Image (cartoon, grey):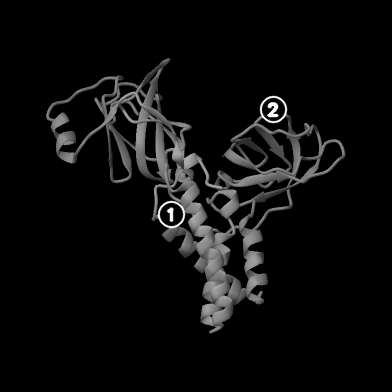
């Protein structure tokens, strides 16, 4: 995988200009291009599960900070999972509220002004609202962090302990235990951070697959990654380099990067522009077929 620091350094190499001013220009070009690209398709890698909690006698709760569009909602009350329907319009939602209705069995959900509403209004607090959503993507801006070390990370576990330096803003960042063949060191693979508990404790999205690190001081790198799939994480830097050489009136160099960018974008759309990545598709009439989005032509 290519972190923000890695692709920023590649941009400096590709433009043969590592001045602070040029690297800042590259940052702007990369982030602008990512935003435009993400607006062009319903990319499956933008969809995540987020959670909120019901508040007693309160219809609306705030959406998690990075939710852009809500796809679906389910609410867990005790051991029962409810799947309310989306309210089809504001007019329909308002009609539901002609009279007061309170229940822990949600029937409809509605998004308005950065909040998620449930109808009927929940009676009790603390029921988990699970939100399948398209997320907002922050700009790439944070350099690799290499000053922390891993003290505890067991094979098959998502529990992570480091020496220091974690902050809540690092949720969604990635950590790589430095590859080494000695005991109490890492496997060199990247793991996404699901949540931060405090400055030394976090939880990973997927279980660690390397040799266990126990009471160690294993070197590691904590990085901000582009949201793009691993094979396409160099595309923002290629675009920025193209813009640089256009600015410098070097058409030959610009065309080289433009060609690489075009090939990369084409491959990205072929691989990921459809959000349905199920192995088998159902046409609704009990006819099933292999998902063409997961096949390739040789």
Q: Quadrant of residue 7?
A: bottom right
Q: Which residue is mark 1?
A: 38
Residue 165 vs 239, above or below: the answer is above
Distance CA(mark 2)–CA(mark 1): 33 Å
Numbered tag placed on residue 156 in the rendering:
2
Q: Compared to 1, does 133 lie above or below? A: above
Q: Please say if 38 is above or below 45.
A: below
Task: Give the mark toward the camera: 2 or 1.
Answer: 1
Residue found farthest to the front: 298
SS class of the residue under badge 2?
loop
Q: Nearer the viewer, residue 56 or 20?
A: 20
Q: Answer with left or right where residue 285 lies relative to residue 255.
A: left
Q: Earlier in the sequence, mark 2 or mark 1?
A: 1
Q: Quadrant of residue 264?
A: bottom right
Residue 38 at x, y percent in the picture: 43, 54
In the picture as drawn, the residue positioned furthest to the bottom comes out as: 249
Rendered location of residue 276, percent (x, y): 42, 38
Mark 1 crowd level (few <14, some 14–19, many ≥20, 10 Å Cα)? some
**Residue 70 appears left or right of 143:** left
Res 97 visible: no
Q: Position of residue 270 (x, y in %)?
A: 47, 50
Looking at the image, which residue sits at the far top? 79
Can I make out residue 69 in this image? yes
> CB atoms at circles 2 and 1 under 8 Å apart?
no
Q: Residue at x 59, y 75 (%)?
A: 22
């Amino acid at each position: 995988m290519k972190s923000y620091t890695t692709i920023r350094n590649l941009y400096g190499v590709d433009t043969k200009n590592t001045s602070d001013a040029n690297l800042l220009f590259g940052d702007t070009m990369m982030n602008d291009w990512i935003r435009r690209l993400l607006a062009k398709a319903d990319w499956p890698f933008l969809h995540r599960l987020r959670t909120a909690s019901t508040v007693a006698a309160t219809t609306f709760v705030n959406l998690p900070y990075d939710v852009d569009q809500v796809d679906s909602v389910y609410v867990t009350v005790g051991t029962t999972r409810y799947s309310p329907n989306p309210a089809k319009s504001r007019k329909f939602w308002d009609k539901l509220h002609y009279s007061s209705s309170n229940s822990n069995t949600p029937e409809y959900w509605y998004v308005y002004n950065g909040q998620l509403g449930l109808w009927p209004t929940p009676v009790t607090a603390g029921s988990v609202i699970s939100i399948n959503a398209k997320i907002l993507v922050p700009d790439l801006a944070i350099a690799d962090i290499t000053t922390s070390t891993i003290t505890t990370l067991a094979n098959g576990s998502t529990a992570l302990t480091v020496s220091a330096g974690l902050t809540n803003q690092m949720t969604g960042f990635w950590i790589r235990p430095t590859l080494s063949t000695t005991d109490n060191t890492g496997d060199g693979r990247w793991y996404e951070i699901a949540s931060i508990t405090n400055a030394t404790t976090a939880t990973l999205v997927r279980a660690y697959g390397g040799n266990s690190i126990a009471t160690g001081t294993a070197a590691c790198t904590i990085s901000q990654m582009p949201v793009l799939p691993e094979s396409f994480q160099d595309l923002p830097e290629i675009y920025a380099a193209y813009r640089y050489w256009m600015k410098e009136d070097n058409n030959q160099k610009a065309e080289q990067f433009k060609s690489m960018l075009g090939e990369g974008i084409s491959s990205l759309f072929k691989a990921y522009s459809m959000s349905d990545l199920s192995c088998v598709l159902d046409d609704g009439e009990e006819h099933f077929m292999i998902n063409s989005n997961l096949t390739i032509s040789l």
